[in-house]
Amino acid sequence: NTIAKNQFTATVTGTGAYNSDVTWTALRGTITSAGFYTAPATSGSDTVIATSVADTTKLSSAAITVQVPLTGTSVKTYGAKGDGVTDDTAAINACITAVSNAGGGTVVVPAGSYMINPTANAGWYGVQVKSNVTLSLDAGSVLQCITNALDSYAIVNLSGNNAVITGSGTISGDRTTHTGTTGEGGHGIYVGN
């Protein structure tokens, strides 16, 4: 995991002979005497405080927001392209299976347009989120159904225990391009066993 680090500076001014040294403190993260700040492991707010060494009643603080990226396994490590052209169904399912087989965890879908074949599994669904797996759709990610003629399908099938979808991405069907003539009963997400 990458740890977020930043350096803070403080300027102490005065007249005559004065000490411009400060001591640093952080309420949640850590900060060195040189002002190098290391964020805490969890998201939230923090406060960094610079206190004058010469006069400890003189201090300044900065409120900061810590946003820790969700850790997990990216579908791109299993070959998903997210280019809006390539069928990414098998790569996403391979990533989910690997994470599930390892005991569970988070599968991350980074920004991009991932084409999903709704007939890839059992002839009626594309991506299968298995037990103890969280499918996290990053902002700007789209699971896009490949145009089909099926009467019924699901882009994502949630099956098993603790199968979760989260994030701010989009799951999009093929309503405007559907080639079937007997209707469309497509689901973005199907919740089953």
Image (spheres, rainbow, N blue to C red):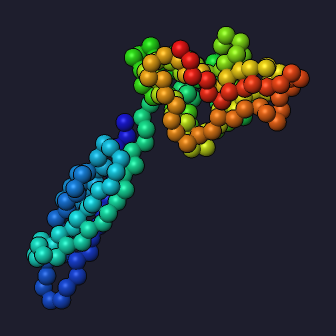
User: Where does the image place residue 43, in percent across and percent down from the top left?
Assistant: 35, 47
- Residue at 13% x, 82% y is 18
Is residue 123 or residue 69 the one in the foreground? 123
Viewer-proximal residue among 76 and 148: 148
Q: State the image quarter where residue 91 is shown.
A: top right
Q: Tell me which residue sits at (19%, 73%) in the image.
A: 59
Horizontal arrangement in the rendering, residue 72 relative to residue 125 (left or right): left
Q: How many marks?
A: 0
Left or right: where does residue 90 sit relative to residue 173? left
Above/below status of 155 relative to 121: below
User: Considering the image in quadrants, where does the N terminus appear?
Assistant: top left
* Residue 12 screen position, x and y as percent: 22, 77
Quadrant hosting residue 9: bottom left
Q: Judge whether 99 appears above or below 138 on screen.
A: above
Q: Position of residue 187 (x, y in %)?
A: 68, 27
Q: Residue at x 63, y 18 (%)?
A: 90
